[in-house]
Amino acid sequence: MNRSLLSLVAVAAVDSGACGARAASGTTVIVTPDTSMTNQDKNKRVAQAAEILNNSDIVCFDVDSTVIREEGIDELARYCGKGTEVARLTKEAMKGSVTFQDALKLRLDIIRPTQRQIREFIKSHPSTLSPGIKDLVNYVRNNGSSVYLISGGFDCLIEPVAIELGIPLTNVFANKLLFYFNGEYAGFDTNQPTSRSGGKGDAILQIRQIHPESNITMVGDGATDLEASPPANNFIGYGGNVVRNEVQTRAQYYVTDFRQLMQPDNCTFKNLNQNNS
C-alpha cells in the first residue's frame, strides 16, 4: 500500500508503570503492584531523597502513574473499546518473553486508534495530575534545576500535561503515532528511544550529551525508571499511585507523597552551595 504517512505528535506505549521492566535479556517483565504494606512502611530514606533532589541539576520524571494518576495505554484502550483485549494480551505477555517494542506494537495493533479518536479522547479524558506534582515541579525549577518528562507513553497525551506544568515540549521524550493521510492508524515511530527496551536510559544519555557535567535524577514508579540509573546519577522511586514491589524493594530511595521531597529549609540548598564555592 503506497499511502503517505502523517505523523501526529501523539502517543504512547506500554509504559514502565503499566507492565514494563527491562530484563537483562532485553525482554519485558511484568511488575505487579504490592498491597501488603502500609504507606509508612513503603517509604525509604526520605530525607536523603529530598537532599538528592535539591542537589540535582536535572530532574527527569516518568509520566504514567507518576506525574499523572492514569496509565495512558489502558485508558485509551478502554475508550476505543479494546480494554479487555489489551488486558488479556498483557496477561499473556507475562507468560513468555517479549521485547518492549513488540509489546507496544501488539497493543497498538489491537487498539488502532485514529486521529479523530485521539483528539476526542484528549478532550473527554484529560489526564489527572498526581497530588503535589505541580508544586514539586515549581520547587525544582525555583531551585535552579531543569525538568524533563521521559515516558514510554503517547506524546499526544503527555504534551498537555507538560504545558500545564510549564515544562518545555523540547524537554519531553515520548512515543509518536503514525497515521495515513485519511487519519487511520499506520504504526508508531520506532526511532524514538522510548519505543524500545532501555529507552529511558537512552533518553537520559541524549540529555547528558547536551549537559555532560549535570547531576541527573530520575523519578518514577516503574522498573524501567529504576533501570535508567545509570546513566542517571540517582533514582527516587514513587509509589503515590501504585507500588511496584520490585521497584520498592530495589530502590535506595522511595516516597509515596511528592510533598516529602519538598523541604522549605533546603529549597535553596544547591544554590547556596554554588554561591559559597
Image: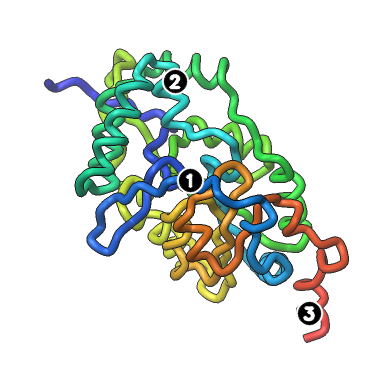
Residue 35 placement: quadrant: top right
Which of the two discs, 2 and 1, sits closer to the camera? 1
Report the side of 260 relative to 153 (left or right): right
Q: Residue at the location (60% across, 42% down)?
A: 241
Residue 245 position in % (x across, y down): 48, 54
Mark 1 residue type: Pro
Q: Residues within 10 Å of mark 2 (few under 14, many from 20)?
A: some
Secondary structure at badge 1 equals loop
Secondary structure found at label 3: helix
x and y, in percent, of residue 15 in the image = 42, 43
**Residue farthest along the bottom direction in this orientation:** 277
Q: Nearer the viewer, residue 211 or 247?
A: 247
Task: Tell me if 81 is positioned left or right of 63 in this view.
Answer: left
| Secondary element at tag 2 | helix
Q: Amino acid at mark 3?
A: Asn
* Mark sitting earlier along the chain (2/1): 1
The amino acid type, in three-letter code, at marker 2 is Ile
| Cα–Cα span, label 3 and label 1 | 39 Å
Quick one: label 3 or label 2, which is nearer the N terminus? 2
**Residue hosting label 1:** 33
Q: Is residue 62 left or right of residue 167?
A: left
- Ranked by sequence position, the earlier of labels 3 and 1 is 1
Q: Which residue is mark 3?
A: 273
Numbered label attached to residue 118: 2
Is the residue under label 1 in contact with that under label 2 (CB below 8 Å)? no
| Nearer to us in this view, 112 or 167 | 112
